[in-house]
Amino acid sequence: MHGSLQRLATDPVSEQRFAKLEETVLALLAKNQELSESIVQLKLDVEDLEQESEESKNLAAIHTTGVYFDAYRTSDYNNTGTVITYHLAEINYGGGIDKNSGIFTTPGEIHR
């Protein structure tokens, strides 16, 4: 070693400073590792949220293209083998029931 480095290596104050620097560097490395692991977990969480968001969009699309209605007849139905018609429809979400004809059309038939 050169003279000044040799003095620093044997100087008690310098040794304390080097020890403190080494301790600080080790703590920073540990924190860096912790943050790196957090970043990996956050990326996984974002992927999960994106997947959930996509699933929610798909469910919303199904819901908005769905059809439901509350319809009824005012008289008995006696014509087996023919189309069942309804006389009144209170709810007609998705437009599946034609209020004029009383005929229900499935969503696949509506969008063709």
Image (tube, helix red, strand yellow):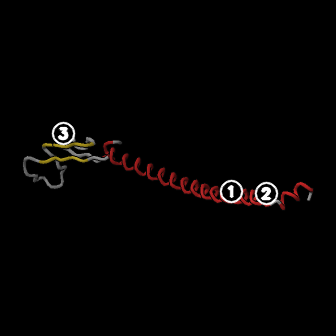
State the SS at label 2. helix
Element marked by disc 3: loop
Residue that appears at 21% across and 40% down: 98
The image quarter containing residue 22 is bottom right
Which residue in the rendered view is the most extreme toward the right?
A: 2
Please tell me how crowded label 1 is: few (under 14), some (14-19), or many (20+) other residues with Cα within 10 Å: few
Q: Give coordinates of residue 91: x percent, y percent.
A: 19, 43
Q: Are marks 1 and 3 in contact (CB under 8 Å)?
A: no
Q: Nearer the viewer, mark 1 or mark 3?
A: 1
Name the disc covering residue 15, or none: none
Q: Residues within 10 Å of mark 2 (few under 14, many from 20)?
A: few
- Upstream in sequence: badge 2 or badge 1: 2
Q: Residue furthest front?
A: 12
The Cα atoms of the two marked residues, 1 and 3, are separated by 78 Å
Q: Nearer the viewer, residue 91 or 35?
A: 35
Q: Position of residue 92 (x, y in %)?
A: 22, 42
**Badge 2 amino acid:** Ser
Query: Mark 2 highlights which residue?
Result: 14
Q: Residue at x 89, y 54 (%)?
A: 4
Q: Which residue is mark 1?
A: 24
Tag 3 residue: 99
* Amino acid at pointer 3: Lys
| Precedes in sequence: disc 2 or disc 3 | 2
Q: How far from the left and from the top, in percent, is residue 62?
A: 35, 48
- Taking the image as shown, residue 86 lies to the left or right of residue 110, namely left
What is the three-letter code of the residue carrying label 1? Thr
Q: Residue at x 31, y 42 (%)?
A: 110
Q: On the rendered image, what quadrant is the C terminus found in?
A: top left
Q: Earlier in the sequence, mark 1 or mark 3?
A: 1
Give me the residue at 41% from left, 47% from top.
Answer: 57
- Determine whether the residue tagged by mark 1 lies in a helix, strand or loop: helix
